C-alpha cells in the first residue's frame, strides 16, 4: 500500500507470516532516482497472512496528533489498529477491533477521524475523534463479498456495496450507526428510497457486478465501476476497467449538465464513464437500463462477461496443469488433428448401433497402431490421454493390447522372451493382437484364487492350460470376442502335482491366417454393457490347450526342462507391473472430471432461472446462486487435488519401476529397500485409485444433475460419461478391496513404527501422533475458538494428519482386539475391516491435501493465491463432509466446524468470478468437450437444438399403421360405451 503522511510518501507492506513494515521515504530531489533518508519500522501483528492495510495520516485527523493510524487485517479475519509515530520510530497497538472469525476485510474507506472496514456480513466503523478508537459494528445481510464502501461526510452515512451489487446505507443517528434499511430511517425517506430500494433493484436485476465505488468531488454523485454483463465498455475508446478505487478524487471532474464523469490524465480528459453514474439527489441513473436486458440474456454475452477479469493468468495455469508449455502446445496440436479427421468424429455416437460402434473402433485401431509405433513416446502418451476423454471406449479397446497384453510381456517376460514376441509383432500389432486374461466368472480381485490351471508336462515340454470348472471361465476379457489372436492368461502353475501360485502364460486363441479358433479354445461375446461398447468383451474357456514351455513368462519364476521350478527370492516383485493401471486411473479421473466440470460450469454461467419478481427483470444465472456455487466449486477443488496427486503418483511409480529394473541379481539392503518402496507405492496407488475414481464418478453425476433435465440427454455428454466411467470403480481391483489392502498396509506400518521401524514419508505424520507403544494418540487440537481454523494450509494439513493418525490407531486397536479374541492374523484383519477402510479414506484424503499444498508452494507466484484458495476449499470442504471424525479426534470443536462451513461459503463466493476461467485453464477444445452445453462461446441452445434435430430428422412413424392407428380406432361392438348425456337446462 502506498500513501502519504503529510508530505512524506509512505509504503506499508504486509507479509504472509504477519510481519508489517512501514517505510517513510524522504525524497530530496524529485528529479533524482535515488531515495534518501529512508525510515523503516517493522513489527509483528497476528501470526497469519496480512491481507489488508488501511492508513489514516495525521492530516486526516480533525485534531492532528503525532500519530498516524494503520489498520492491519489478517487472513484469519482479525483486525488490529496501530498508532505509528510521525518519525516512524515506534508502533503502538491501540486496539483489536475484530477477533479471528475467518471473514477477512475486503474493503475500507478513510474519512476525517473515521475508518470504515467491511467484511462479509459486517461493517466496522472506527471513530478516532476522541483519541482512543471507538468501535461500532453493524450487521449486514449480503450474499456476496463486499468490495467497496464510501464515507459520505455531507450526509453522515456510509455506502456499502457487494460484488452482487447489493447496496446498503449505514447512517449515523447521534453517536450510533445503524443500517438505513431499518424501518423508520429518516435517511431512507430523505433519499427517496433510491439507494435502498430503487437503485439496487435496477442494477441487480441486470446482474451487474460491482468492482469499485466512490463519491464525486462535488458530493453529488455516487460513482460505480461495474463488471458488466454485456459487451459494452465502461471507458469509451480506452482500456476496459475491471476494478477501480477512487483514492484521489481530484483526478476526476463531473459535468453536471451532461452527467458524465471524466478522468484527467496529464491535463487531458481520457474518456467517458457510461452507465455507472448515479444521481443521489434525484434518484436517477444516467441511462435507461431496461433496453440492455435483452442483450444481457444472450448466452454468448453472458459467458463472455465471465472471462473479463480473471484473477490469474489463464494460459500460465494451463501450462502448470499440463506440466509445461511444450506439453500444452503438443496437446493442442493433437486435439486439432483429431478434430479435423472424420474418422475421429464422436458427436454421433449416441445414434450408432453396437456393430457400427465396434466397426468404427477397429478403424481407429488401424489408424492409431501405426502412429503409436512410429511417433515419440511422449506424443503417444499425450495422444492417449486426450483420447481417454474423447472416446473412452476406444481408449480401452486400444489399451487392452498396448497397455495390458504388451504391458504383461514387458513386466513378466525375460529379455529373450520379449524380443521373441516383439519379432512376432506383439508391439506393432502386425500378426498379433492381444488381450489380458485375468478375471474369471468366479474370481476377480482374488488373483491368488483363480481356478484356470497350467500343468507342466515334462515329457512334451509343454503346459496344459485348462478351465476345470464353469467359474474358471475367463470373463470380461476385452478384445476376446472378435479381435484377439493371443491372450496373456493368468493361471495356477502346477508342476509334479504341486501348485506354485498364479503365473502368466501366452496362449494363442485364433489362427493368425484363417482367424479360426485354436483347438480347445471356446470364445463368446458378452454383448451389451452399461458403457464402453467399443470394446468387444468376451468369455474364454480352455479345454486342455497345449502351449510350449517357453510361452510361460519367466522374468521372475522359471520352470526348467526337467521340471525344476526356480522361484524368485521375493515373489511380490512380480506384481510391480500391475500398479501401472491403478496409477493411470488417477490421471484419468482428473481428466474426466475436468471435462464434466467444464460442461457444468459453462452451462451454469449462461443458464438463467428465476428472477426477483420485478417486471421485465432478467432471470438469474445459476452460477450466481450460492447453493449452485456450493454444488460445483468444491468439485473444482477436488479435481485440482486429483491432478496434482496423479502427477506425484506417476513420478513415484516411474521411480519405483526404474529401481526394480535395476535390481538384477541384487540382494540384501537394495532388495529390502525396493520391497519397502513397492509396498508403499502399492498401498498409496490402491487408495488413490479407489477414492479418486469414486470422487470422479460423483463429480460426473453431480455435474449431470446440475444440468437439470438436459443432463439426461445422451447428446449433452454426461449421462454417457457416467456409464463409461463407472467401470473404473471395479476393474484393476474392486475399490473396496483396494481400500482394505491400503488399510492393511497402514496397520502393518503403524505396528512396525511401534517396534522402532522408520516411517515412510507419506506416513511421517504418525511419528508425532503415536506414543512409544503405539497405543496412545497425541492430538494437538485447534487452540480455543480464535484459532486459525482454515487460514493456512499448514493448519488444514495438521488437522487432516491428526484425523488420519487417529483412524490408523483405531484400526490397529481393532486388529489387536481381534488377535486378543484368538483370531488368526488374517481373520483379525477381517475383524478390523471397517476401521481399515476408514483409515484408508482418511490417509488418502490427507495425501491429496499434502500433495496439493506441495504443488501450491512450487507454483508460479501469479497462480499461488488462486491455487491456495482452491487447496483450502478442498481441505475445509472435505473436513466438513467428515466432521464426525474431526470432532472425534479432538482437533476441532463444534463451533469451529461451523466456522469451517462459513469459510467454505466465503471461499465459494471468492472463487465464483474465476469459475469459467478455471475451466478454460483445463485447455480442452469444444471437440474434446463434445457437448453443446459446454461450448466455449456459450451458444448452448442453438447448438443443442441443431444437434438433436440433425441426428433425429422428422420421418414417418414406422409403427403408426401397425400399432398406433389400431389402438386409436379399435372398437368393442359387443359392449358399446355409455352415451354422453347433456343437461338441456
Image (cartoon, grey):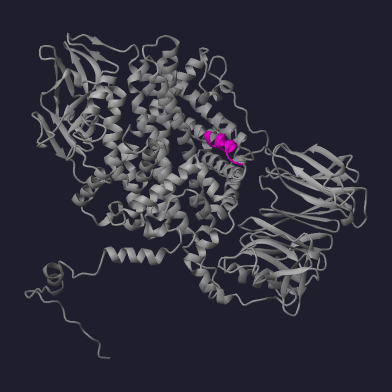
**View extreme (left): residue:** 974
Visible in this render: residue 698? no
| Residue 658 percent across, percent down from the top left | 41, 23
Which quadrant of the view contains residue 490?
A: top left
Q: Is residue 443 above or below residue 979?
A: above
Is 857 within the magenta?
yes
- Magenta span: helix, strand or loop, mainly? helix
| Residue 972 percent across, percent down from the top left | 9, 73
Q: Nearer the viewer, residue 693 or 10?
A: 10
Which residue does the image show at 68% across and 35% down from the upper left? Answer: 784
Which residue does the image show at 45% across and 36% down from the upper left? Answer: 646
Which quadrant of the view contains residue 279?
A: bottom right
Q: Number of callouts in the render?
A: 0
Q: Is residue 669 left or right of residue 581?
A: right
Magenta range? 851-860
Visible in this render: residue 85? yes
Q: Is residue 295 above or below residue 369?
A: below
Which residue does the image show at 35% across and 45% down from the upper left? Answer: 387
Q: Nearer the viewer, residue 585 or 442?
A: 585
| Residue 226 percent across, percent down from the top left | 64, 64
Q: Is residue 657 left or right of residue 135?
A: left
Quadrant of the drawing holding the C terminus: bottom left
| Residue 950 percent across, percent down from the top left | 29, 65
Is 317 within the magenta?
no
Amino acid at each position: 500500500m502506498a500513501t502519504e503522511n503529510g508530505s512524506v510518501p509512505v509504503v506499508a507492506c504486509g507479509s504472509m507470516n504477519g510481519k508489517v513494515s512501514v517505510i517513510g521515504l524522504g525524497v530530496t530531489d524529485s528529479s533524482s532516482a535515488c531515495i534518501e533518508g529512508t525510515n523503516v519500522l517493522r513489527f509483528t501483528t497476528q501470526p497469519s497472512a496480512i491481507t489488508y492495510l488501511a492508513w489514516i495520516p495525521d492530516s486526516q485527523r480533525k485534531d492532528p496528533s503525532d500519530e498516524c493510524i494503520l489498520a492491519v487485517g489478517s487472513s484469519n479475519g482479525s483486525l488490529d489498529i496501530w498508532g505509528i509515530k510521525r518519525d516512524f520510530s515506534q508502533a503502538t497497538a491501540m486496539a483489536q477491533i475484530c477477533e479471528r472469525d475467518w471473514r477477512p476485510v475486503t474493503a475500507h474507506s478513510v474519512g476525517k477521524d473515521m475508518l470504515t472496514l467491511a467484511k462479509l456480513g459486517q461493517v466496522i466503523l472506527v471513530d478516532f475523534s476522541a483519541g482512543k478508537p471507538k468501535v461500532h459494528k453493524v450487521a449486514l445481510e449480503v450474499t456476496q463479498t463486499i468490495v467497496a464502501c464510501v464515507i459520505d461526510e455531507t450526509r453522515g452515512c456510509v455506502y456499502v456495496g457487494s460484488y452482487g451489487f447489493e447496496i446498503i446505507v449505514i447512517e449515523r443517528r447521534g453517536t450510533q450507526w445503524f443500517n438505513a434499511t431499518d424501518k423508520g430511517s429518516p435517511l431512507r425517506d430523505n433519499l427517496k428510497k433510491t439507494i435502498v430500494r430503487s437503485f439496487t433493484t435496477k442494477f441487480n436485476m441486470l446482474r451487474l457486478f460491482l468492482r469499485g465505488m466512490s463519491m464525486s468531488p462535488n458530493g453529488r454523485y455516487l460513482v460505480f465501476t461495474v463488471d458488466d454483463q454485456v459487451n459494452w465498455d465502461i471507458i469509451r475508446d480506452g482500456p476496459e476497467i475491471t476494478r477501480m478505487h477512487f483514492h484521489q478524487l481530484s483526478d476526476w471532474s463531473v459535468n453536471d449538465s451532461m452527467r458524465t464523469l471524466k478522468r484527467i490524465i496529464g491535463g487531458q480528459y481520457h474518456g467517458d464513464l457510461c452507465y455507472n453514474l448515479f444521481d443521489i439527489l434525484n434518484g436517477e441513473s444516467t441511462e435507461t437500463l431496461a433496453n440492455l436486458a435483452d442483450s444481457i440474456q444472450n448466452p454468448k454475452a453472458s459467458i463472455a462477461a465471465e472471462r473479463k477479469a480473471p484473477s490469474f493468468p489463464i494460459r500460465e495455469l494451463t501450462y502448470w496443469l499440463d506440466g509445461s508449455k511444450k506439453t500444452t502446445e503438443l496437446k493442442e496440436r493433437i486435439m486439432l488433428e483429431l478434430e479435423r479427421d472424420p474418422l475421429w468424429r464422436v458427436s454421433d455416437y449416441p445414434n450408432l448401433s453396437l456393430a457400427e460402434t465396434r466397426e468404427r473402433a477397429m478403424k481407429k485401431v488401424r489408424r492409431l497402431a501405426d502412429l503409436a509405433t512410429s511417433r515419440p513416446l511422449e506424443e503417444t502418451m499425450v495422444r492417449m490421454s486426450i483420447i481417454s476423454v474423447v472416446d473412452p471406449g476406444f481408449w480401452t479397446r486400444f489399451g487392452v493390447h498396448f497397455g495390458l497384453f504388451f504391458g504383461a510381456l514387458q513386466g513378466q517376460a525375460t529379455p529373450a522372451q520379449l524380443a521373441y514376441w516383439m519379432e512376432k509383432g506383439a508391439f506393432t500389432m502386425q500378426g498379433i493382437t492381444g488381450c489380458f486374461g485375468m478375471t474369471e466368472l468366479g474370481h476377480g480381485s482374488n488373483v491368488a484364487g483363480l481356478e484356470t490351471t497350467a500343468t507342466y508336462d515334462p515329457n512334451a515340454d509343454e503346459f496344459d492350460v485348462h478351465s476345470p470348472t464353469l467359474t474358471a471361465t475367463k470373463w470380461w476379457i476385452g478384445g476376446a470376442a472378435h479381435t484377439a489372436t493371443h491372450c496373456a492368461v493368468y493361471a495356477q502353475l502346477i508342476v509334479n502335482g504341486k501348485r506354485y501360485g498364479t503365473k502368466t502364460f501366452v496362449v494363442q486363441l485364433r489362427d493368425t491366417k484363417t482367424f479360426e479358433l485354436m483347438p480347445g479354445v471356446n470364445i463368446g461375446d458378452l454383448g451389451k454393457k452399461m458403457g464402453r461398447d467399443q470394446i468387444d468383451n468376451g468369455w474364454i474357456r480352455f479345454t486342455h490347450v497345449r502351449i510350449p514351455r517357453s510361452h510361460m513368462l519367466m522374468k521372475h519364476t522359471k520352470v526348467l526342462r526337467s521340471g525344476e521350478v526356480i522361484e524368485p527370492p521375493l515373489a511380490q516383485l512380480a506384481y510391480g507391473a500391475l500398479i501401472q493401471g491403478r496409477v493411470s486411473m488417477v490421471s484419468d479421473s482428473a481428466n474426466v472430471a475436468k471435462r464434466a466440470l467444464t460442461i457444468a460450469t459453462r452451462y451454469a454461467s449462461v443458464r438463467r432461472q428465476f428472477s426477483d419478481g420485478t417486471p421485465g427483470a432478467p432471470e438469474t444465472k445459476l452460477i450466481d446462486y450460492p447453493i449452485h456455487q456450493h454444488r460445483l466449486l468444491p468439485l473444482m477443488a477436488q479435481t485440482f487435488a486429483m491432478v496434482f496427486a496423479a502427477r506425484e503418483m506417476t513420478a513415484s511409480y516411474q521411480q519405483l519401476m526404474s529401481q526394480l529394473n535395476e535390481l538384477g541379481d541384487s540382494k540384501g539392503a537394495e532388495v529390502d529397500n525396493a520391497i519397502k518402496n513397492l509396498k508403499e507405492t502399492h498401498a498409496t496407488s490402491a487408495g488413490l485409485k479407489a477414492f479418486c475414481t469414486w470422487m470422479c464418478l460423483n463429480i460426473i453425476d453431480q455435474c449431470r444433475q446440475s444440468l437439470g433435465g438436459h443432463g439426461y440427454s445422451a447428446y449433452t455428454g454426461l449421462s454417457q460419461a457416467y456409464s463409461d466411467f463407472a467401470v473404473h470403480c471395479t476393474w484393476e481391483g474392486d475399490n473396496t478391496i483396494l481400500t482394505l489392502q491400503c488399510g492393511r498396509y497402514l496397520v502393518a506400518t503403524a505396528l512396525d513404527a511401534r517396534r522402532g521401524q522408520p516411517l515412510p514419508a507419506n506416513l511421517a505424520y504418525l511419528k508425532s501422533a503415536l506414543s512409544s507403544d503405539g497405543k496412545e494418540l497425541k492430538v494437538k487440537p485447534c487452540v480455543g475458538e480464535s484459532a486459525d481454523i482454515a487460514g493456512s494450509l499448514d493448519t488444514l494439513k495438521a488437522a487432516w494428519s491428526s484425523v488420519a493418525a487417529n483412524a490408523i490407531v483405531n484400526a490397529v486397536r481393532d486388529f489387536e482386539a481381534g488377535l486378543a479374541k484368538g483370531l488368526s492374523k488374517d481373520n483379525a484383519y477381517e475383524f478390523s475391516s471397517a476401521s481399515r477402510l476408514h483409515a484408508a479414506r482418511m490417509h488418502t484424503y490427507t495425501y491429496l491435501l499434502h500433495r496439493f499444498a506441495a504443488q501450491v508452494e512450487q507454483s508460479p507466484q501469479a497462480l499461488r493465491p488462486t491455487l491456495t484458495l482452491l487447496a483450502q476449499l478442498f481441505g475445509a470442504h472435505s473436513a466438513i463432509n467428515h466432521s464426525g471424525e474431526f470432532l472425534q479426534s479432538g482437533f476441532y470443536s463444534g463451533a469451529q466446524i461451523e466456522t469451517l462451513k462459513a469459510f467454505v461459503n466465503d471461499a465459494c463466493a471468492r472463487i465464483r468470478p474465476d469459475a469459467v476461467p478455471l475451466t478454460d485453464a483445463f485447455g480442452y477444445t469444444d471437440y474434446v468437450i463434445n457437448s453443446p452445453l459446454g461450448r466455449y462461446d456459450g451458444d448452448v441452445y442453438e447448438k443443442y437444438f441443431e444437434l438433436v434435430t440433425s441426428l433425429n430428422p422428422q420421418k414417418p412413424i414406422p409403427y403408426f399403421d401397425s400399432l398406433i392407428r389400431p389402438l386409436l380406432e379399435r372398437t368393442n361392438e359387443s359392449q358399446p360405451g355409455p352415451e354422453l348425456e347433456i343437461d338441456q337446462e
